[in-house]
Image (tube, rainbow, N blue to C red):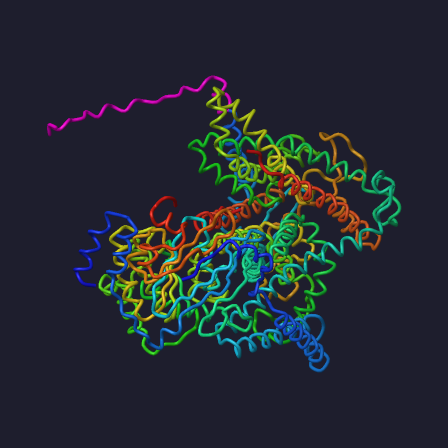
Amino acid sequence: MSTDDNGDKENMETKTTPSSLSSVASSSKRKVVNTKAMGTGLEARGVHAWFGKHHALADVSLDFAAGTVTALIGPSGCGKSTFIRTLNRMHEFIPSAAMAGQVILDGKDIYDPSVDVTKIRLQIGMVFQKPNPFPSMTIGENVLSGLKLAQLKTENKDDLLEECLVKAGLWNEVKDRLNAHGGSLSGGQQQRLCIARSLAVRPQVLLMDEPCSALDPGSTLRIEETIEELSSSMTIVIVTHNMQQAARVSDYTAFFLSDGGPGQMIEMAPTNEIFARPRDKRTENYVTGRFG
Amino acid sequence: MSTTETTYVIPEKRELTTKPRFSDKVFRGVVTGGGLSSLLILGLIFGFLLYQGFDILKSQGFDFITTSRWDIAYDEAGNVLSSDFGLSSMLIGTILCSFIAVLIAVPISVATALYLTFYAPQWIKKSMVTIIDLMAAFPSILFGIWAYFILMPSGVYWAKLINHYLGFIPLFENKDRYFQGSPFIASLILAVMIIPIITSISREIFSQAPLDRIQAAYALGATRWAMIKAVVIPHGRNGVIGGAMLGLGRAMGETVAVYTVLNIVFAINWKILFGVGGNVASLILTKFGEASAYEIKGLMAAGLVLFVLTLMVNFASDQLVRRFGGSGK
Amino acid sequence: MTMKTDTQAKTYQNVQPKRPWQASVKDRVTTAIVLAIAIISATLLVKVTGLSGKLGFFFAFVLIFVALTSGRQYRRFGSASAKDALVNTLVAAGTFLTLIPITSIIFEVFSKGYKGIYLGLFTSDMSLNSPNDPANVGGLGHAIIGTLILVAIALVISVPIGILTALYLTEIKGRFSQPIRFLVQAMSGVPSIVAGLFILSAILYPITKQNSALLGSLSLAILMIPTVARTSEEVLNLIPNDLREAGVALGGTQWRTVAMIVVPAAKSGLLTAVILGVARIAGETAPILLLAGGGDRFNFDPFNGPMGSLPYFIWNSFKSGTPESIARAWTGLLVLLVVLLFLFSAARFLGNRKVGK
């Protein structure tokens, strides 16, 4: 990213009018590079989610195009996290969980009975809100842990290790202490370690559930830079409470809302449009800060 | 606005004393007394056993633990001429049976605990936890009699099988072909008795495995076993060892159940399939009925040794469970 | 760009929640077939080779089942999935092994013990006959009374001490807390025969020189105190601190707060602790043999003379060795087991009542 853009953004951040957010959004330039490894993106069709009898999410259909970054915004409790967890089949770990609808990856529904769910999670990775490296492993072992867990073989572990840490923006800080304890890093570093860990299994899609909400602004900036770089080779979906962040990093934004009933996806548009000219009144109320 | 700095003088901290009312002082005294009573009781146990068994310990010295015999010589008047007490075969028997019991029980308990925490549907989990807790409350006489009538025949059968295929290993030899009442069978019933405890502790430890790391492992594409291996086992390993040691301590102190199945003989026997063995607790029970006052002293000394042994094992286990696993039980 | 309108909200009635991750019908059928194949092959193997009996069948079955399921998973999804399937089976096998003894015990006790149950069992004792007489003569009334007396006295001693200890740990939290907690833990590991020996050497030999229920109760109390103390501590810790603060804020002294607010709030939990302690000692045999003796007649005096008890009755009958006496032992075990089941259910029922906020 050029310093111009950086400078521009810093001036804009003092105001939160929709037009300023949309300027932020359009000032970020991104090239969409369609490589084969990126796959064809991810699509959710009519996804519903229940917890027992409680209908938490209703009829969400979203198409995440390959090589794009999509931000999911909305107030707390509107189902964004639930939705993102249906995308990599983590939702089903909750004992009373149920769902309906389809999630299509590479032309196939990931919920199809013939599918190996662990393979799906290799292709659709996830980074969580609270960094969770494995404390019983070293930094190097953490990055490669995905391979060990899935029993994957690689020719050159060291190259893969370096590549992932470089992509996550952590290589320079840890290259001399790859054998140090996984928990000995700062919060921001731990989160970048978790990102590197997710990258090692070469996912097509990376899901991020409020990855920066537990971090300081400096670490947040580093991670947003990482997201920018990663988007040229994979599809990213990021849940965020921070509208400025959505404006900074995403190509598309989807607004979720629950009006007491199940959470729904109200509106999805290219980021600068949703902030400048939101179609739905509720979206406009949210992005102008009238609630939430 | 002037820019003079206001300097603060930090005042002395006030002393906060709450002088308890008299009734509270009494209350605290009574409660503390109740609490210290356990110290009192434990100390008394140790003290009295030592007091009663002191003569024997003094005259036997280290022989008490290193030799193996139980002889008393009386003269015509019934007075004691000489005595020679040695516990080694009983001690070795206790330790041998308990260790094998733990060896058998731990894999089964860990498997059950894993099943209940990560595999079982809620309704199976609830009912099985109840059943296992119930089993932990069964009295040892129940286990002992069941073992004698029902476990022993099967145990003898398995022992014969092991002897048939693996009899070339000295541990499994049995030249006299006498399989009844062997340390192996005692180990089996001890294992059955300690499985509930180890399962309960392991289950508590596993259920406290950090959820965020479990989710991280699954999100990376791990199967359930891969997740357990990567997250649960490193987290719970020490706690489970602590639980195993607690089972070991229980097994060492077990009296009645071993008594019914073990053939007590004063000879050190490592061949676990062969029908003779030793166990300190059962020895005390056996000899007690007809023991003279003098012999009782020997039994007291034996009780003291057993007490110290179980105390050490339980202490070690407590440290492990407390430090590495849940709330421990 | 997509938007939602209100009309689409109405169509949600048609959408049914599903759980596509659970085993599909096809999966279940395949598993059933694999199970059947494993059973049949194991049976055949047992008939044909030297493997014999239930053990042989069990091993053969497990091995074949593991091979089939792991193999299937390997072909479908690779080695990680195969290992997972293997562990699945091992875990299930271990659980099964845990269940076998307990079902066997309960089954045997009931099937062997019920024959001796008759009304007179509870009203007569063994003073007029020997254990070798047929089961419809004599009974264990004295044993039940004995166990009741023994437990009652042990209760009176251990419940105050146990609950006071728990109160010290949760309410006063003084500097003895660490050692006391450790000691309670140590006490729970005291072998029952050592507790018996202690009372023997401390009181029976020097002072009373005869068996009595009181001495038996003393040793049972040693075994019961740690159970009561630990469970009570857990229960008292569950009482939220708001209650204590409310009591003190109203001007109550500490002892009034504890006695009138905390303890009543923990009532059912403390009762559970007591019941669990009783269950622990009701079946204890070793100290009883040393201290309470046994005797074969009703004895209502806890201070003098041997006192019968269920464990002693069972033990004595067992040692007599004849088929009749052994049948008596099973009947005694049945009565003991029923008492334990009752106590246990009571503790569960009380424990499930929520601690009031």
Q: In this view, does C157 lie above or below C85?
A: above
- Give the image location of residue B85, x and y in percent: 58, 50
Q: Does C34 sit left or right of A122 as displayed? A: right
| Nearer-the-camera pick, B120 or B152 | B120
Q: Does A138 sit left or right of C17 as displayed? A: left
Q: Find residue A64 and report its image quarter.
A: bottom left
Q: Is residue B243 above or below residue C59?
A: above
Residue B19 in magenta stretch: yes
- Give the image location of residue B146, x and y in percent: 72, 56
Query: What secondary structure is the stretch in magenta mostly built from?
Result: loop
Q: In this view, does C164 lie above or below A216?
A: above
Residue at 42 percent of width and 32 percent of height: C175
Residue at 46 percent of width and 23 percent of height: C249
Q: Residue furthest bottom?
A: C48
Tell me, yes or no, if residue B77 can be seen here.
Answer: no
Tell me, yes or no, if residue C73 can be seen here.
Answer: yes
Q: Find residue A267 and report its image quarter.
A: bottom left
Q: Does A238 sit left or right of A168 as displayed? A: right
Magenta region: B1-29
Q: Find residue B295 and report its image quarter.
A: top right
Q: In which quarter of the image is the N terminus of chain B?
A: top left
